[in-house]
Image: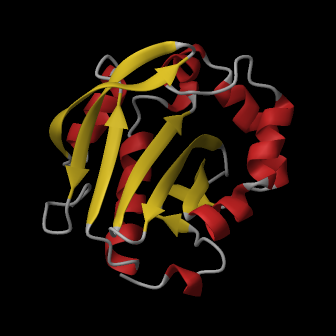
């Protein structure tokens, strides 16, 4: 696997339709609006209510998260007009050469292939540029949208992690799905 110390700043990734770029301070209002959505609050351990100050803090801390924690985060925008579509991340464990991918799609952009596109770009970067050996996604088994994304991207469901996470005081299960470099890639 590539030495992550050689990567000072996250790259911009694009498929011609979608662009993943590092966060900018001007993204805070869009991030706050996206994270106030009922579906986002249902499936993710976000502050409730999610305030503009939460988004500003998230964005301001992005560089440190990458340098210290190897937690890469991008905002997803439309390639043509820069319209905010969602966000994605990968938390990298360099020692085991694996990463955990996460994503959130803006309400108005759901069911349009945005999540699949974000995951495909992150998968390409992790396998092709970094040489990672495994990627995984976890989601609540009741989250139909995320389950569709996992399957559309070729991830293999490995099992159910019982009572894995706590969201708003409720302990819930998680599906665990993985993709290996030898598996068919999303979008190919």
Q: In the image, what residue occupies the spot 35% across and 81% down?
A: 1
Considering only vertical position in the picture, is 137 above or below 24? above
Scheme of colours in the image: secondary structure
Identify the residue shown where x is 74% and y is 24%: 50
Locate residue 132: give its quadrant.
Answer: bottom left
Question: Closer to the camera, 110 or 7?
Answer: 7
In the image: residue 35, left or right of residue 148 = right
Q: In the image, residue 72 lies at what x, y percent? A: 56, 60
Tell me the residue at 33%/44% (across/down): 137
Q: Is residue 29 above or below residue 154?
A: above
Q: 54 or 74, which lies in front?
A: 54
Quarter of the image for residue 48 reads top right
Residue 153: in sight, yes or no?
A: yes
Image location (x, y in percent) of residue 159: 16, 34
Give the quadrant of the C terminus: bottom left
Residue 15 visible? The answer is no
Is residue 80 or residue 22 the one in the foreground?
22
Q: Is residue 85 left or right of residue 178?
A: right
**Residue drawn at the location 51% of the way across and 67% of the way down:** 13
**In the rendered view, would you say 50 is above or below 97?**
above
Horizontal and vertical percent for residue 143?
35, 21
């Amino acid at each position: 696997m590539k030495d992550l110390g050689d990567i000072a700043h996250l790259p911009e990734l694009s498929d011609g339709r979608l662009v993943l770029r590092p966060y900018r301070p001007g993204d805070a209002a869009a991030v706050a609006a996206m994270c106030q959505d009922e579906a986002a609050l249902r499936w993710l351990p976000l502050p409730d209510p999610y305030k503009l100050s939460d988004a500003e803090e998230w964005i301001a801390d992005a560089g440190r998260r990458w340098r210290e924690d190897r937690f890469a985060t991008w905002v997803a925008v439309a390639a043509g007009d820069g319209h905010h579509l969602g966000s994605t991340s990968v938390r990298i464990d360099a020692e085991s050469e694996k990463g955990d991918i996460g994503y959130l799609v803006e309400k108005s952009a759901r069911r349009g292939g945005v999540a699949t596109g974000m995951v495909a770009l992150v998968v390409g970067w992790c396998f092709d540029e970094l040489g990672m050996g495994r990627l995984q996604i976890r989601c609540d088994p009741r989250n139909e949208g995320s389950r569709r994304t996992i399957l559309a991207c070729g991830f293999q469901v490995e099992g159910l992690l019982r009572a894995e996470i706590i969201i708003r005081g409720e302990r819930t299960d998680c599906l665990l799905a993985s993709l290996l470099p030898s598996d068919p890639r999303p979008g190919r």
